[in-house]
Image (spheres, rainbow, N blue to C red):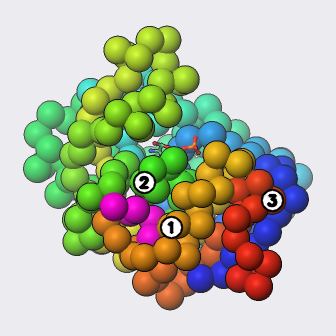
Amino acid sequence: MRIQRARDFKDMSRKAANILSAQVILDRRSVLGLATGSSPTGVYRQLIDWHGKGDIDFSECVTVNLDEYYGLGPDSDQSYSWFMRKNFFESVNIKPENTHLPNGLEKDAKKECQRYEDMIRCLGGIDIQLLGLGLNGHIGFNEPGAAFEADTHLVTLTQSTIDANKRFFEKEEDVPRKAYTMGIRTIMHAKRILVIVSGESKAEIAKRAFFGPITPEIPASVLQLHNNVTVVGDEAALSLILEEALA
Ligand code: GLP
């Protein structure tokens, strides 16, 4: 695991965008695993900026997102599908048919999870998976206790995640209680993983996830077992991690 220290959110976003753009430049048909939340917004802004300057071309790229709320469709402005369009897809030349998220409107969980896993497999797997880190150590929506061997599945969100995500909704009652998420196994099969962490509130969980025991209680701790992980964190998020541990 390589850990890169960035000055602040902007620097973190730029460093992470550099890694993603290198992937796309080296292989224009890359399969990019993407994430939502506030952490990746700066990465998307930076990629849009470089795209606008003609430095990066997404016309052959394929994207697969980590997760989607159960019950929300692409027309809902709280869905992750909407988030991705507004924060990234609409501003670059990626083909809409090459962007994939779980279908939150599919009620048959078994069918939808199988479809998503099959789709990722048919694409030849994920070349690089971008991840944020939940306050409780979740990745995607794999909450504490999630089985490491799980593929894409339907989860019931914990109260801590509902609390953390209610800022995006008008009322807490509006936050969906369930979501489809790639499982830990799906994430661990990505060829490369890029984790971004920002802010003081993530300092404790970053230390525990990347330097503590590997346990399902902290889902992100499993990333210590992957052989190609880069963590880019800002000063505040890495403040509890010793200098010697940093790349
Ligand atoms: C959400 C998403 C995760 C994300 C996490 C952290 O629950 N499902 O994929 O990484 O929150 O979000 P933020 O970056 O806003 O802290």
What element does badge 3 sit on?
loop
Residue 246 falls in image quadrant: bottom right
Label 1 Cα neighbours within 10 Å, binned few <14 / some 14-19 / many ≥20: many
Q: CA distance from mark 2 to mark 3?
A: 21 Å
SS state under label 1: helix
> Tag 3: Cα neighbours inside 10 Å, few (<14), some, or many (≥20)?
many
Residue on which the image places disc 2 = 138
Q: Which residue is mark 3?
A: 235
What label sits on residue 182 in the rendered view? none
- State if disc 3 and disc 1 touch (CB < 8 Å): no
Dot 2 surroundings within 10 Å: few (below 14), some, or many (20 or more)? many
Left/right of residue 86 with respect to residue 112 in the rendered view:
right
Tell me if residue 175 comes above or below residue 5 in the rendering.
above
Residue 45 painted magenta: no
Residue found 60% across the figure and 57% down from its top: 204
- From the image, state whether disc 1 or disc 2 is nearer to you: 1
Q: Amino acid at mark 1?
A: Ala
Disc 2 marks a residue whose amino acid type is His
Sequence order check, earlier mark of 2 and 3: 2
Q: Position of residue 2 (x, y in %)?
A: 66, 81
The residue pinned by badge 1 equals 209
Q: Amino acid at mark 3?
A: Glu
Q: Which residues are magenta?
A: 217-221
| Residue 92 locus on image (x, y percent) | 69, 46
- Which percent across, then down, holds residue 87? 64, 37
Q: Is mark 1 within 8 Å of ligand 1?
A: no
Query: Is residue 31 something one can see in this rendering?
Result: no
